[in-house]
Amino acid sequence: MVARKPSDALLVCVALAAVAALATLGERAFPWAIVLVAAVPWYPLVSYQAEGPAVRQEVLCAAIAAAPLLPWLWSLAVGGRRAPRPSRLSLLMGLLFAGLAALMFETLGSISEVIGESQEIGFLAGGVTFLCARRFASDRQWPAAAFGGLVALALLGAAAYLKAPSNRIGYFTGYPITYGALLVGLLPAALLFAYRRSRLLAGAVAGVSGALLIFSESRSSWVAVAVVLVVLVALQARAGNMRGLIALASAVAVLAALVLSTESLHHIVQQRLSSQIATSQSVTHREWSYGYALHAIRERPVFGAGAPGYSSQEAASQTGIGAIDNGYLSISVDLGLVGLFAALIPIGIGLRVLWRCLLLGLTPRYELALALGILGMAVVTAFYDSFYWPQIDLLLGAMGGVLSTRVAGLNAQAGVFARERRSRQRAGWAGGSSV
């Protein structure tokens, strides 16, 4: 096989290594498989524009499909932990994505077109990953996997910067904004992993991630970080957690002081994130994107064009830039409001968790880490065609699937928290009366 077709032999070796890794990791394999597929450099390390993957599309699509399915099938085979009781909503979601797959097949005319391009299979894999993730909801392995993925992205970013210091980093994920979205999605869980071991390590993770976002020139990711910080401050204030608020304020103050006091770093920030980066072409393209998308949605509101990628092709033919600067509009053009609803399911789960935590005054670290990661990627999607990138689809689907089984537990946590607070109050009153 090596003599006839080395690429096929390599795929067989990778498959055998994956099976061995699954046998070693057990239930931990699912988050690690998702994160590693998302962080692997499928595209050239350094570039000056978006390019095609450095591997064959078949290899990339096989990895996308294998990331959720291999751990899930292995767990079924060995009789691992069972998912919560199947719900009608999860069944309806499976039928929804099956219907979207049939719609894509009808539009493209071939099953190879549906599963042979990363855009199509990436979107469908997001739904499959959501359903598979429900089986692994009891495992708290996401912080460790997110930390490992962030380290891999940091090392690749450092290598890209050393190779071309004047260039944006992140093209090895497809595009620098994709790189920024992955960093924002993994950062909350990675910080949780680091904070449990050392506050110094958590500070280093935050500082390195900030530097990587600067050198990627992904301003939408900085907007996402700001939104995540605002939501986190609101949650800590609602829960009355002054230690958390002080820690957040201290971290922001240290980073701001570091940027303002260090002349070279201040120059880098000013140069990389200044408003001069926004050229008239990008502003004009964004205006065109909104006008075109709204017109196309009004013409075909339910199912759209019938396949992902249609809007990017239209944008490339009319403007020379192959993207619409809003992921929610682009998926609505391609798959209509039905496709938009399917894409919003994991994002809606994350927002629901954040809202219930705010109402109940809870700050469960594990759930918030996943929900804030989803929120960060959702904010980036407002400025970028995130649903075209399977790495982001996999992360959104996996985190949303895990959270979908943990929403009901928030009420129980609120009850435990209320009882503990009442017991502390009674203990305080008793101590006061004895004095």
Image (cartoon, rainbow, N blue to C red):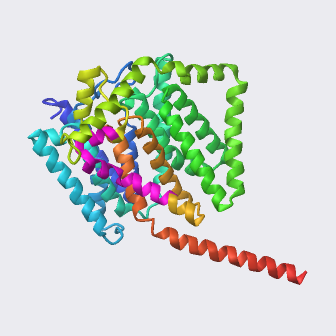
Q: Residue at x 68, y 61 (%)?
A: 240
Residue at 55%, 70% in the rendered image: 413
Residue visible at 48% across and 70% down? 409
Query: In the image, 282: left or right of 217?
Result: left
Q: Pick whichever, 363 or 235, lies toward us.
A: 235
Give me the residue at 73% from left, 75% from top. 424
Asked if one can make out residue 29 in the rendered structure from this viewpoint, the answer is: no
The x, y position of residue 149, in whole percent, is: 45, 42
For this view, does 350 lie left or right of residue 419?
A: left
| The image quarter in which residue 62 lies | top left
Q: Is residue 334 magenta?
A: yes
Which residue is at the front of the view, 379 or 13?
379
Quadrant where the C terminus is found in the figure: bottom right
Q: Would residue 227 be counted in the magenta stretch?
A: no
Residue 19's spot in the image, x, y percent? 29, 51
Residue 208's x, y, as percent?
A: 58, 34
Q: Is residue 434 left or right of residue 273?
A: right
The answer to whether residue 150 shows anywhere in this view is yes
The N terminus - image quarter: top left
**Range drawn in magenta:** 329-354
* Residue 308 position by quadrant: top left
* 238 vs 6: above or below: below
The secondary structure making up most of the magenta span is helix
What is the count of numbered marks? 0
